[in-house]
Amino acid sequence: MIDHQQKNSRRSPSRRHLGSGLAILGLGLLLGAPLAAVADDGQILLPELGDSSSGVVSRTREKELGQMWLRMFRSQVRTSNDALLQQYVENTVKSLSEYAPLEDKSIDVVVVSNDTMNAFAVPGGIMGVHTGLFLFAENEDQFASVIAHELGHLSQRHYARSLEAQRNSTIPTLAGMLGALVLAATAGGDAGIAAMTATQAAALDSQLRFSRQNEQEADRVGIETLAKSGRNPEEAGEMFEQMLRATRYYRRPPEFLLTHPVTEKRIADAKLRANRMPAVETSDSREYHLMRARIRVAAEATPQQAVKRFQAELRGISDNEDAARYGLALAQTAAGKMDTALETLQPLLDREPDKAAFVLARADIDLARQDHSSATKRLRKALERNPGDHALTMGLANAHFKAGNYLAAERILERHSRVRKKDPTVWYLLAETHGLAGDIVGVHEARAEYYILNGVFDKALQHLRHGIRMAKDDYQTHAILEQRMKDVIKMQEKAKEL
Protein backbone atom coordinates (compact mmCIF):
# COMPACT_ATOMS: atom_id res chain seq x y z
CA MET A 1 0.00 0.00 0.00
CA ILE A 2 1.17 3.58 -0.63
CA ASP A 3 2.69 4.87 2.59
CA HIS A 4 1.22 8.33 3.00
CA GLN A 5 2.81 8.60 6.43
CA GLN A 6 6.25 8.43 4.89
CA LYS A 7 5.19 11.31 2.70
CA ASN A 8 4.04 13.24 5.77
CA SER A 9 7.24 12.48 7.61
CA ARG A 10 9.22 14.63 5.21
CA ARG A 11 7.58 17.69 6.73
CA SER A 12 9.18 17.08 10.12
CA PRO A 13 12.60 15.52 10.79
CA SER A 14 11.72 14.97 14.45
CA ARG A 15 8.64 12.79 14.08
CA ARG A 16 9.86 9.90 16.24
CA HIS A 17 10.34 12.23 19.18
CA LEU A 18 7.20 14.19 18.41
CA GLY A 19 4.97 11.11 18.67
CA SER A 20 5.89 10.47 22.30
CA GLY A 21 6.00 14.16 23.14
CA LEU A 22 2.48 14.74 21.90
CA ALA A 23 1.23 11.70 23.74
CA ILE A 24 2.49 13.28 26.96
CA LEU A 25 1.72 16.91 26.29
CA GLY A 26 -1.02 17.13 23.66
CA LEU A 27 -3.92 16.89 26.11
CA GLY A 28 -2.95 20.02 27.99
CA LEU A 29 -2.00 21.84 24.82
CA LEU A 30 -5.46 21.56 23.39
CA LEU A 31 -7.58 21.82 26.50
CA GLY A 32 -5.75 24.34 28.60
CA ALA A 33 -5.17 22.14 31.65
CA PRO A 34 -1.90 22.33 33.66
CA LEU A 35 0.42 19.91 31.96
CA ALA A 36 3.28 18.68 34.09
CA ALA A 37 4.30 18.31 37.68
CA VAL A 38 7.28 16.68 39.32
CA ALA A 39 6.87 14.68 42.52
CA ASP A 40 9.32 14.63 45.41
CA ASP A 41 10.75 11.37 44.14
CA GLY A 42 11.39 12.87 40.70
CA GLN A 43 8.48 11.12 38.95
CA ILE A 44 6.62 13.15 36.37
CA LEU A 45 2.88 13.34 36.96
CA LEU A 46 0.51 14.75 34.38
CA PRO A 47 -3.20 15.53 34.52
CA GLU A 48 -5.62 13.07 32.99
CA LEU A 49 -9.20 13.41 32.01
CA GLY A 50 -13.73 14.21 34.69
CA ASP A 51 -16.77 12.76 36.30
CA SER A 52 -20.31 12.66 35.06
CA SER A 53 -21.41 15.32 37.55
CA SER A 54 -18.93 17.96 36.41
CA GLY A 55 -20.47 20.96 34.74
CA VAL A 56 -17.24 22.72 33.84
CA VAL A 57 -16.94 21.23 30.35
CA SER A 58 -19.94 19.85 28.50
CA ARG A 59 -19.75 16.49 26.80
CA THR A 60 -20.47 18.16 23.47
CA ARG A 61 -17.55 20.52 23.98
CA GLU A 62 -15.31 17.62 24.99
CA LYS A 63 -16.23 15.79 21.77
CA GLU A 64 -15.50 18.87 19.69
CA LEU A 65 -12.16 19.48 21.40
CA GLY A 66 -11.25 15.81 21.11
CA GLN A 67 -11.80 15.81 17.37
CA MET A 68 -9.74 18.97 16.97
CA TRP A 69 -6.97 17.47 19.10
CA LEU A 70 -6.97 14.34 16.95
CA ARG A 71 -6.56 16.38 13.76
CA MET A 72 -3.68 18.34 15.28
CA PHE A 73 -2.08 15.15 16.53
CA ARG A 74 -2.25 13.43 13.15
CA SER A 75 -0.71 16.47 11.47
CA GLN A 76 2.47 16.09 13.51
CA VAL A 77 3.05 12.41 14.25
CA ARG A 78 3.60 9.28 12.21
CA THR A 79 0.50 7.15 12.49
CA SER A 80 0.17 3.58 11.30
CA ASN A 81 -1.33 2.81 7.89
CA ASP A 82 -1.54 -0.92 8.67
CA ALA A 83 -5.25 -1.65 8.18
CA LEU A 84 -5.03 -5.08 9.84
CA LEU A 85 -3.40 -3.63 12.96
CA GLN A 86 -5.79 -0.67 13.05
CA GLN A 87 -8.74 -3.04 12.85
CA TYR A 88 -7.39 -5.22 15.66
CA VAL A 89 -6.85 -2.27 18.02
CA GLU A 90 -10.27 -0.80 17.18
CA ASN A 91 -11.95 -4.15 17.88
CA THR A 92 -10.11 -4.51 21.19
CA VAL A 93 -11.09 -1.01 22.30
CA LYS A 94 -14.70 -1.59 21.22
CA SER A 95 -14.96 -4.94 23.01
CA LEU A 96 -13.66 -3.40 26.24
CA SER A 97 -15.72 -0.20 26.00
CA GLU A 98 -18.87 -2.32 26.04
CA TYR A 99 -18.03 -3.21 29.67
CA ALA A 100 -16.70 0.20 30.76
CA PRO A 101 -18.98 2.73 32.51
CA LEU A 102 -18.94 5.09 29.54
CA GLU A 103 -22.03 7.05 28.55
CA ASP A 104 -20.69 7.41 25.00
CA LYS A 105 -18.98 4.20 23.91
CA SER A 106 -17.89 5.47 20.49
CA ILE A 107 -14.11 5.78 20.61
CA ASP A 108 -11.84 7.09 17.86
CA VAL A 109 -8.61 5.08 17.80
CA VAL A 110 -5.26 6.34 16.54
CA VAL A 111 -2.35 3.90 16.27
CA VAL A 112 1.02 5.64 16.51
CA SER A 113 4.02 4.17 14.68
CA ASN A 114 6.43 4.45 17.58
CA ASP A 115 8.30 1.67 19.37
CA THR A 116 7.93 3.27 22.79
CA MET A 117 5.43 1.77 25.23
CA ASN A 118 2.58 4.23 25.53
CA ALA A 119 -1.16 4.66 25.37
CA PHE A 120 -3.26 7.72 26.12
CA ALA A 121 -6.83 8.95 26.30
CA VAL A 122 -8.13 12.37 25.32
CA PRO A 123 -11.52 13.90 26.20
CA GLY A 124 -14.18 13.39 23.59
CA GLY A 125 -13.50 9.69 23.14
CA ILE A 126 -10.00 9.58 21.65
CA MET A 127 -7.74 6.60 22.35
CA GLY A 128 -4.12 6.47 21.25
CA VAL A 129 -1.92 3.38 21.24
CA HIS A 130 1.77 3.25 20.37
CA THR A 131 2.83 0.19 18.41
CA GLY A 132 5.55 -0.27 21.02
CA LEU A 133 2.91 -1.38 23.51
CA PHE A 134 2.74 -4.67 21.61
CA LEU A 135 6.46 -5.19 22.22
CA PHE A 136 6.02 -4.93 26.00
CA ALA A 137 2.65 -6.63 26.63
CA GLU A 138 3.32 -10.38 26.64
CA ASN A 139 -0.30 -11.41 26.05
CA GLU A 140 -3.61 -9.92 25.03
CA ASP A 141 -4.90 -9.53 28.57
CA GLN A 142 -1.88 -7.40 29.49
CA PHE A 143 -2.43 -5.29 26.38
CA ALA A 144 -6.14 -5.00 27.21
CA SER A 145 -5.36 -3.93 30.78
CA VAL A 146 -3.69 -0.76 29.46
CA ILE A 147 -6.66 -0.02 27.18
CA ALA A 148 -9.08 -0.64 30.06
CA HIS A 149 -7.11 1.76 32.27
CA GLU A 150 -7.39 4.51 29.66
CA LEU A 151 -11.11 3.83 29.30
CA GLY A 152 -11.27 4.32 33.06
CA HIS A 153 -9.91 7.84 32.66
CA LEU A 154 -12.45 8.57 29.92
CA SER A 155 -15.37 7.11 31.88
CA GLN A 156 -14.59 9.19 34.96
CA ARG A 157 -14.07 12.38 32.92
CA HIS A 158 -10.87 13.21 34.75
CA TYR A 159 -10.17 16.15 32.49
CA ALA A 160 -13.36 17.99 33.52
CA ARG A 161 -12.60 17.29 37.16
CA SER A 162 -9.06 18.62 36.79
CA LEU A 163 -10.48 21.87 35.42
CA GLU A 164 -12.76 22.10 38.45
CA ALA A 165 -9.76 21.64 40.76
CA GLN A 166 -7.79 24.29 38.88
CA ARG A 167 -10.62 26.80 38.56
CA ASN A 168 -8.69 29.51 40.41
CA SER A 169 -5.27 28.78 38.96
CA THR A 170 -3.47 30.80 36.35
CA ILE A 171 -3.50 28.77 33.13
CA PRO A 172 -0.66 29.47 30.65
CA THR A 173 -1.65 30.61 27.20
CA LEU A 174 -2.10 28.05 24.48
CA ALA A 175 0.66 29.77 22.52
CA GLY A 176 3.07 29.12 25.37
CA MET A 177 1.99 25.52 25.57
CA LEU A 178 2.47 25.09 21.83
CA GLY A 179 5.98 26.51 22.11
CA ALA A 180 6.83 24.06 24.89
CA LEU A 181 5.34 21.23 22.84
CA VAL A 182 7.55 22.08 19.88
CA LEU A 183 10.54 22.29 22.23
CA ALA A 184 9.71 18.85 23.63
CA ALA A 185 9.55 17.44 20.12
CA THR A 186 12.79 18.96 18.86
CA ALA A 187 15.04 19.27 21.92
CA GLY A 188 13.83 16.31 23.96
CA GLY A 189 10.89 15.61 26.23
CA ASP A 190 12.58 16.67 29.47
CA ALA A 191 13.31 20.18 28.19
CA GLY A 192 9.73 20.72 27.10
CA ILE A 193 8.30 19.39 30.35
CA ALA A 194 10.66 21.59 32.35
CA ALA A 195 9.59 24.64 30.36
CA MET A 196 5.95 23.94 31.04
CA THR A 197 6.47 23.16 34.69
CA ALA A 198 8.25 26.48 35.23
CA THR A 199 5.16 28.40 34.11
CA GLN A 200 2.72 26.43 36.27
CA ALA A 201 4.29 26.24 39.71
CA ALA A 202 1.19 27.60 41.45
CA ALA A 203 -0.85 24.57 40.40
CA LEU A 204 1.61 21.79 41.17
CA ASP A 205 0.72 20.73 44.72
CA SER A 206 -3.00 20.26 44.13
CA GLN A 207 -2.35 18.69 40.75
CA LEU A 208 -0.05 16.08 42.28
CA ARG A 209 -2.66 14.89 44.71
CA PHE A 210 -5.44 14.92 42.17
CA SER A 211 -3.41 13.06 39.59
CA ARG A 212 -2.70 10.21 42.03
CA GLN A 213 -6.41 10.03 42.81
CA ASN A 214 -7.20 9.85 39.11
CA GLU A 215 -4.75 7.01 38.65
CA GLN A 216 -6.23 5.01 41.54
CA GLU A 217 -9.71 5.53 40.15
CA ALA A 218 -8.66 4.52 36.63
CA ASP A 219 -6.95 1.42 38.05
CA ARG A 220 -10.14 0.41 39.83
CA VAL A 221 -12.43 1.02 36.85
CA GLY A 222 -9.95 -0.55 34.44
CA ILE A 223 -9.55 -3.75 36.42
CA GLU A 224 -13.32 -4.06 36.82
CA THR A 225 -13.75 -3.54 33.06
CA LEU A 226 -11.10 -6.15 32.35
CA ALA A 227 -12.87 -8.69 34.57
CA LYS A 228 -16.34 -7.96 33.16
CA SER A 229 -15.02 -8.51 29.64
CA GLY A 230 -13.95 -12.04 30.56
CA ARG A 231 -10.24 -11.29 30.71
CA ASN A 232 -7.91 -12.06 33.58
CA PRO A 233 -7.79 -9.01 35.92
CA GLU A 234 -4.55 -10.27 37.45
CA GLU A 235 -2.78 -9.35 34.22
CA ALA A 236 -3.17 -5.66 35.12
CA GLY A 237 -0.73 -6.13 37.98
CA GLU A 238 1.49 -8.26 35.76
CA MET A 239 1.55 -5.47 33.17
CA PHE A 240 2.52 -2.93 35.82
CA GLU A 241 5.39 -5.20 36.83
CA GLN A 242 6.39 -5.58 33.19
CA MET A 243 6.56 -1.78 32.91
CA LEU A 244 8.60 -1.47 36.08
CA ARG A 245 11.05 -4.12 34.87
CA ALA A 246 11.48 -2.17 31.64
CA THR A 247 12.98 0.75 33.57
CA ARG A 248 15.97 -1.43 34.45
CA TYR A 249 16.95 -1.92 30.82
CA TYR A 250 16.26 1.51 29.35
CA ARG A 251 17.93 4.83 30.09
CA ARG A 252 14.58 6.61 29.81
CA PRO A 253 11.47 5.04 31.37
CA PRO A 254 8.66 3.93 29.04
CA GLU A 255 6.53 6.91 28.04
CA PHE A 256 3.51 5.38 29.76
CA LEU A 257 5.29 5.57 33.11
CA LEU A 258 5.83 9.30 32.71
CA THR A 259 2.09 9.89 32.60
CA HIS A 260 1.13 6.96 34.85
CA PRO A 261 3.80 6.50 37.58
CA VAL A 262 3.96 2.91 38.81
CA THR A 263 5.07 2.05 42.34
CA GLU A 264 5.32 -1.19 44.28
CA LYS A 265 2.24 -0.12 46.25
CA ARG A 266 0.26 0.44 43.07
CA ILE A 267 1.22 -3.02 41.83
CA ALA A 268 0.23 -4.56 45.17
CA ASP A 269 -3.10 -2.70 45.15
CA ALA A 270 -3.86 -3.90 41.60
CA LYS A 271 -3.09 -7.50 42.54
CA LEU A 272 -5.17 -7.29 45.70
CA ARG A 273 -8.13 -5.89 43.79
CA ALA A 274 -7.82 -8.63 41.15
CA ASN A 275 -7.57 -11.37 43.79
CA ARG A 276 -10.97 -10.36 45.12
CA MET A 277 -12.54 -11.17 41.76
CA PRO A 278 -13.43 -14.59 40.35
CA ALA A 279 -10.39 -16.40 38.94
CA VAL A 280 -10.13 -16.28 35.15
CA GLU A 281 -7.48 -18.00 33.07
CA THR A 282 -5.37 -15.69 30.96
CA SER A 283 -6.42 -15.85 27.32
CA ASP A 284 -3.43 -16.60 25.13
CA SER A 285 -5.00 -15.01 22.06
CA ARG A 286 -3.31 -16.08 18.86
CA GLU A 287 -4.69 -12.99 17.12
CA TYR A 288 -2.76 -10.80 19.53
CA HIS A 289 0.45 -12.70 18.86
CA LEU A 290 -0.10 -12.37 15.10
CA MET A 291 -0.40 -8.59 15.45
CA ARG A 292 2.60 -8.57 17.74
CA ALA A 293 4.58 -10.43 15.07
CA ARG A 294 3.75 -7.69 12.56
CA ILE A 295 5.12 -5.07 14.96
CA ARG A 296 8.21 -7.12 15.74
CA VAL A 297 9.07 -7.50 12.05
CA ALA A 298 8.88 -3.72 11.60
CA ALA A 299 10.85 -3.09 14.81
CA GLU A 300 13.94 -4.97 13.60
CA ALA A 301 16.69 -2.93 11.95
CA THR A 302 16.48 -4.97 8.73
CA PRO A 303 14.20 -7.68 7.31
CA GLN A 304 17.19 -10.05 7.40
CA GLN A 305 17.51 -9.60 11.16
CA ALA A 306 13.79 -10.26 11.54
CA VAL A 307 14.19 -13.47 9.52
CA LYS A 308 16.93 -14.67 11.86
CA ARG A 309 14.90 -13.85 14.96
CA PHE A 310 11.78 -15.73 13.84
CA GLN A 311 13.79 -18.66 12.52
CA ALA A 312 15.36 -18.99 15.97
CA GLU A 313 11.91 -18.90 17.58
CA LEU A 314 10.57 -21.61 15.31
CA ARG A 315 13.56 -23.80 16.17
CA GLY A 316 13.35 -23.04 19.88
CA ILE A 317 10.79 -21.42 22.16
CA SER A 318 8.13 -18.99 20.98
CA ASP A 319 5.06 -17.38 22.53
CA ASN A 320 2.95 -18.80 19.73
CA GLU A 321 4.20 -21.10 16.97
CA ASP A 322 1.71 -19.85 14.37
CA ALA A 323 2.70 -16.25 15.10
CA ALA A 324 6.40 -17.13 14.79
CA ARG A 325 5.74 -18.79 11.43
CA TYR A 326 3.62 -15.83 10.31
CA GLY A 327 6.29 -13.35 11.39
CA LEU A 328 8.94 -15.33 9.54
CA ALA A 329 6.85 -15.31 6.34
CA LEU A 330 6.37 -11.53 6.62
CA ALA A 331 10.08 -11.01 7.22
CA GLN A 332 11.03 -13.22 4.28
CA THR A 333 8.63 -11.29 2.05
CA ALA A 334 10.16 -8.00 3.18
CA ALA A 335 13.61 -9.46 2.48
CA GLY A 336 12.57 -10.33 -1.09
CA LYS A 337 12.60 -14.12 -0.55
CA MET A 338 9.20 -14.86 -2.06
CA ASP A 339 9.56 -18.59 -2.66
CA THR A 340 10.79 -19.18 0.87
CA ALA A 341 8.07 -16.92 2.29
CA LEU A 342 5.36 -18.89 0.49
CA GLU A 343 6.80 -22.17 1.73
CA THR A 344 6.75 -20.81 5.30
CA LEU A 345 3.23 -19.42 5.02
CA GLN A 346 1.57 -22.36 3.24
CA PRO A 347 0.88 -24.54 6.33
CA LEU A 348 -1.07 -21.65 7.86
CA LEU A 349 -3.06 -21.12 4.65
CA ASP A 350 -3.79 -24.83 4.33
CA ARG A 351 -5.45 -24.83 7.75
CA GLU A 352 -7.21 -21.45 7.44
CA PRO A 353 -7.47 -20.39 3.80
CA ASP A 354 -9.85 -17.49 4.55
CA LYS A 355 -8.13 -15.93 7.56
CA ALA A 356 -7.51 -12.26 6.77
CA ALA A 357 -3.97 -12.10 8.13
CA PHE A 358 -2.85 -15.12 6.10
CA VAL A 359 -4.71 -14.12 2.93
CA LEU A 360 -3.18 -10.65 3.03
CA ALA A 361 0.29 -12.12 3.53
CA ARG A 362 -0.25 -14.44 0.55
CA ALA A 363 -1.55 -11.56 -1.56
CA ASP A 364 1.57 -9.54 -0.74
CA ILE A 365 3.67 -12.38 -2.14
CA ASP A 366 1.52 -12.43 -5.29
CA LEU A 367 1.88 -8.67 -5.71
CA ALA A 368 5.63 -8.84 -5.21
CA ARG A 369 5.71 -11.39 -8.03
CA GLN A 370 3.56 -9.09 -10.19
CA ASP A 371 0.81 -11.73 -10.13
CA HIS A 372 -1.96 -9.19 -9.67
CA SER A 373 -4.72 -11.48 -10.92
CA SER A 374 -4.06 -14.12 -8.23
CA ALA A 375 -3.89 -11.44 -5.53
CA THR A 376 -7.21 -9.84 -6.46
CA LYS A 377 -9.00 -13.19 -6.85
CA ARG A 378 -7.71 -14.39 -3.50
CA LEU A 379 -8.69 -11.18 -1.68
CA ARG A 380 -12.10 -10.99 -3.36
CA LYS A 381 -12.92 -14.53 -2.28
CA ALA A 382 -11.84 -13.87 1.30
CA LEU A 383 -13.86 -10.65 1.40
CA GLU A 384 -16.97 -12.45 0.17
CA ARG A 385 -16.65 -14.73 3.18
CA ASN A 386 -15.81 -11.83 5.53
CA PRO A 387 -17.96 -8.97 4.21
CA GLY A 388 -17.09 -5.54 5.52
CA ASP A 389 -13.66 -6.55 6.78
CA HIS A 390 -11.61 -3.34 6.76
CA ALA A 391 -8.20 -4.93 6.21
CA LEU A 392 -9.40 -7.17 3.36
CA THR A 393 -11.25 -4.27 1.74
CA MET A 394 -8.15 -2.09 1.78
CA GLY A 395 -6.06 -5.03 0.62
CA LEU A 396 -8.33 -5.67 -2.37
CA ALA A 397 -8.44 -1.98 -3.29
CA ASN A 398 -4.66 -1.81 -3.09
CA ALA A 399 -4.28 -4.93 -5.23
CA HIS A 400 -6.55 -3.45 -7.92
CA PHE A 401 -4.59 -0.21 -7.71
CA LYS A 402 -1.27 -1.97 -8.24
CA ALA A 403 -2.76 -3.99 -11.08
CA GLY A 404 -3.86 -0.81 -12.83
CA ASN A 405 -7.56 -1.61 -12.31
CA TYR A 406 -8.25 1.93 -11.14
CA LEU A 407 -12.00 1.93 -11.73
CA ALA A 408 -12.41 -1.25 -9.66
CA ALA A 409 -10.29 0.21 -6.86
CA GLU A 410 -12.25 3.46 -7.09
CA ARG A 411 -15.61 1.70 -6.65
CA ILE A 412 -14.37 -0.20 -3.60
CA LEU A 413 -12.85 2.85 -1.94
CA GLU A 414 -15.82 5.11 -2.63
CA ARG A 415 -18.08 2.65 -0.81
CA HIS A 416 -15.55 2.19 1.98
CA SER A 417 -15.09 5.94 2.48
CA ARG A 418 -18.78 6.17 3.37
CA VAL A 419 -18.26 3.56 6.08
CA ARG A 420 -14.95 4.91 7.38
CA LYS A 421 -15.39 8.65 6.92
CA LYS A 422 -12.74 9.48 9.52
CA ASP A 423 -9.99 7.22 8.22
CA PRO A 424 -7.19 9.24 6.53
CA THR A 425 -5.70 6.12 4.91
CA VAL A 426 -8.91 5.45 2.98
CA TRP A 427 -9.11 9.02 1.69
CA TYR A 428 -5.44 9.09 0.72
CA LEU A 429 -5.67 5.97 -1.43
CA LEU A 430 -9.00 7.12 -2.86
CA ALA A 431 -7.43 10.41 -3.98
CA GLU A 432 -4.60 8.56 -5.71
CA THR A 433 -7.09 6.21 -7.34
CA HIS A 434 -9.39 9.02 -8.51
CA GLY A 435 -6.42 10.66 -10.19
CA LEU A 436 -5.42 7.58 -12.13
CA ALA A 437 -9.07 6.84 -12.99
CA GLY A 438 -9.42 10.34 -14.45
CA ASP A 439 -11.80 11.82 -11.85
CA ILE A 440 -9.97 15.08 -11.09
CA VAL A 441 -12.83 16.60 -9.10
CA GLY A 442 -12.82 13.43 -7.01
CA VAL A 443 -9.08 13.86 -6.44
CA HIS A 444 -9.61 17.31 -4.92
CA GLU A 445 -12.56 16.18 -2.82
CA ALA A 446 -10.73 13.14 -1.41
CA ARG A 447 -7.51 15.06 -0.78
CA ALA A 448 -9.50 17.74 1.03
CA GLU A 449 -10.98 15.10 3.34
CA TYR A 450 -7.52 13.66 3.93
CA TYR A 451 -6.12 17.06 4.89
CA ILE A 452 -9.13 17.85 7.08
CA LEU A 453 -8.55 14.69 9.08
CA ASN A 454 -4.90 15.65 9.42
CA GLY A 455 -5.62 19.20 10.54
CA VAL A 456 -4.04 20.82 7.47
CA PHE A 457 -6.92 23.18 6.74
CA ASP A 458 -5.13 25.49 4.28
CA LYS A 459 -4.45 22.61 1.91
CA ALA A 460 -7.98 21.27 2.39
CA LEU A 461 -9.41 24.64 1.36
CA GLN A 462 -7.06 24.83 -1.61
CA HIS A 463 -8.32 21.48 -2.94
CA LEU A 464 -11.95 22.38 -2.27
CA ARG A 465 -11.59 25.61 -4.24
CA HIS A 466 -10.08 23.71 -7.16
CA GLY A 467 -12.89 21.17 -6.97
CA ILE A 468 -15.57 23.87 -6.90
CA ARG A 469 -14.15 25.55 -10.01
CA MET A 470 -14.01 22.26 -11.89
CA ALA A 471 -17.51 21.18 -10.82
CA LYS A 472 -19.29 24.39 -11.88
CA ASP A 473 -21.49 22.44 -14.31
CA ASP A 474 -22.38 19.75 -11.74
CA TYR A 475 -24.84 21.46 -9.40
CA GLN A 476 -24.97 18.71 -6.78
CA THR A 477 -21.21 18.23 -6.48
CA HIS A 478 -20.65 21.99 -6.56
CA ALA A 479 -23.10 22.48 -3.67
CA ILE A 480 -21.54 19.66 -1.62
CA LEU A 481 -18.04 21.09 -2.03
CA GLU A 482 -19.16 24.62 -1.20
CA GLN A 483 -20.79 23.41 2.01
CA ARG A 484 -17.68 21.44 2.87
CA MET A 485 -15.58 24.56 2.39
CA LYS A 486 -17.81 26.43 4.86
CA ASP A 487 -17.33 23.56 7.33
CA VAL A 488 -13.55 23.74 6.99
CA ILE A 489 -13.50 27.52 7.48
CA LYS A 490 -15.40 27.02 10.75
CA MET A 491 -12.95 24.30 11.82
CA GLN A 492 -10.05 26.63 11.03
CA GLU A 493 -11.59 29.44 13.07
CA LYS A 494 -12.20 27.16 16.05
CA ALA A 495 -8.64 25.87 15.84
CA LYS A 496 -7.37 29.44 16.13
CA GLU A 497 -9.46 29.95 19.27
CA LEU A 498 -7.76 27.08 21.06
Image (cartoon, rainbow, N blue to C red):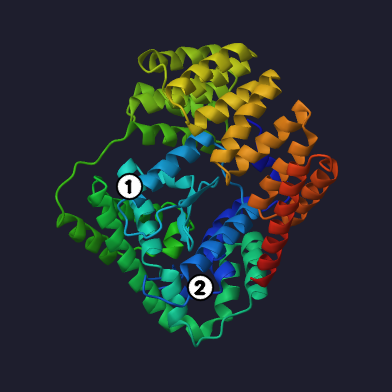
Does dot 2 land on a helix, a strand or a loop?
loop
Residue 134 versus residue 312 in the image, above or below: below
Quadrant of the drawing holding the N terminus: top right
- Locate residue 222: give its quadrant: bottom left
Q: Measuring 42% from the left and 60% from the top, which residue is drawn there?
A: 257
**Left-right relation of 352 to 112:** left
Q: Residues within 10 Å of mark 2 (few under 14, many from 20)?
A: many
Label 1–label 2 contact, CB within 8 A: no
Q: Earlier in the sequence, mark 1 or mark 2?
A: 2
Q: The disc labelled 1 sits on which kind of residue?
A: Gln
- Label annotation for residue 36: 2
Q: Gap between marks 1 and 2, in whole Å? A: 27 Å
Does dot 1 land on a helix, a strand or a loop?
helix
Q: Position of residue 448 (x, y in %)?
A: 72, 47
Q: Position of residue 472 (x, y in %)?
A: 84, 43
**Left-right relation of 161 to 466:** left
Q: Which residue is mark 1?
A: 142
Residue 82 versus residue 235 in the image, above or below: above
Q: Nearer the viewer, residue 174 or 22?
A: 174
Q: The disc labelled 2 sits on which kind of residue?
A: Ala
Residue 184 versus residue 55 in the image, above or below: above
**Left-right relation of 227 to 94:** left
Q: Nearer the viewer, residue 80 or 272?
A: 80
Residue 428 versus residue 14 in the image, above or below: above
